[in-house]
Amino acid sequence: MTLLTLHDVSKRFDGVTAVDGVTFQVDRGEVVGFLGPNGAGKSTTMRLVTQYYEPDTGEIRLDDVPLAERPREAKRRIGYLPENNPLYGDMLVAEYLDFIARLRDLHGAGGREALDEAVSRTGIGGVYYRPIGELSKGFRQRVGLAQAILHRPDLLVLDEPTEGLDPNQRVEIRRLIGDLGRDRTVVLSTHVLSEVQHTCSRLLVIHRGKIAADGPVDVLTRQAAGGAVVTFEAAGQDVDEAVAAVAGVRRISHAEEREGRRRLTLEVEGGHDVRPALFEAAKTRGWALYELHQETQSLEELFQQLTGNS
């Protein structure tokens, strides 16, 4: 069931188009990675979804209701962690989250329960009574996530949540986002491609304000121009000639002989899976098969292909 819909949304600043006719939908329960080069329109799109900006043209709907018709209700259902994660450094974590709870109209037992849940989910109990200004970048990001989920939103919008973190902190935040995505819809803006592969079920690529690709990560990489690379190793007669004749094999890009075996690197036409045919050829011809492995185009290569002229 569709939760968020953008239809032909555009936004301009001083005559410069930041978002240009963007259309996409996000279903309930999805964790969507939103990728693009710097200046491609990622943050602007997220600010449009969270109503920091109003679109110049087009429409944004939450549960098929235009944001413009019920803006306050929509804000109650969206959690947002901006790229710069604005926090009050002189406040204790406890004071800050209590302040956010009051802004979100969370009071009494229900408010305390929501606060306890946010603290527990983000793992900030150990720093709850410390000043925010004394926290590491990783814990500040966790506090930012806590305020974003405090009101139990249906849609969680995260803009570069791991920016500036070290590798260990990135893994921790990525694990936390994956956990949060189990019971809510998440749109995650990032330029760290590994986060998309480990966290997201779907990929949106924006380039020069337009959607350049939309779909599951594995499907997009399989469909990308250039196809796949297959490594094939077998011992037998006429291996090179028979393999080159298999439908879908574009060419043998590398071949070597070792210990009586032929090891071949094959370039495969896009959309073809030649592994069954290669296995059948080995079986029919009596070859000893040592390796048959396919590598699809990497996410980095796909990203460069879609945005390389930026």
Image (tube, helix red, strand yellow):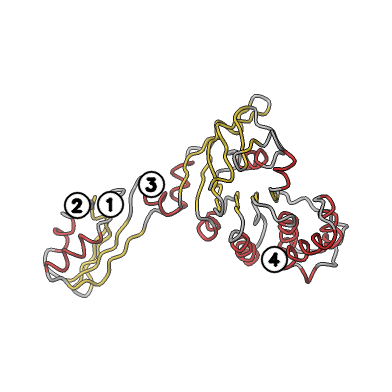
Instruction: Tell me the amino acid under the disc marked 2.
Output: Ala
Secondary element at tag 3 = loop
**Mark pair 4, 1: CA separation:** 43 Å
Instruction: Tell me the amino acid under the disc marked 1.
Output: His
Q: Residues within 10 Å of mark 1 (few under 14, many from 20)?
A: some
Seen from this angle, which residue lies furthest top? 15
The residue singled out by tag 3 in the image is 224
Q: Is residue 305 left or right of residue 243?
A: right
Are the residues flagged by discs 2 and 1 in contact, CB closer than 8 Å? Answer: yes
The residue singled out by tag 4 in the image is 121
**Mark pair 3, 4: CA separation:** 37 Å
Are the residues flagged by discs 1 and 3 in contact, CB closer than 8 Å? Answer: no
Secondary element at tag 2 = loop
Q: Nearer the viewer, mark 4 or mark 2?
A: 4
Name the residue at 25% across, 61% down. Answer: 275
Q: Residues within 10 Å of mark 3 (few under 14, many from 20)?
A: some
The residue singled out by tag 1 in the image is 272
First along the sequence among labels 4 and 2? 4
Are the residues flagged by discs 4 and 2 in contact, CB closer than 8 Å? Answer: no
**Mark pair 1, 3: CA separation:** 12 Å
Q: Nearer the viewer, mark 3 or mark 4?
A: 4
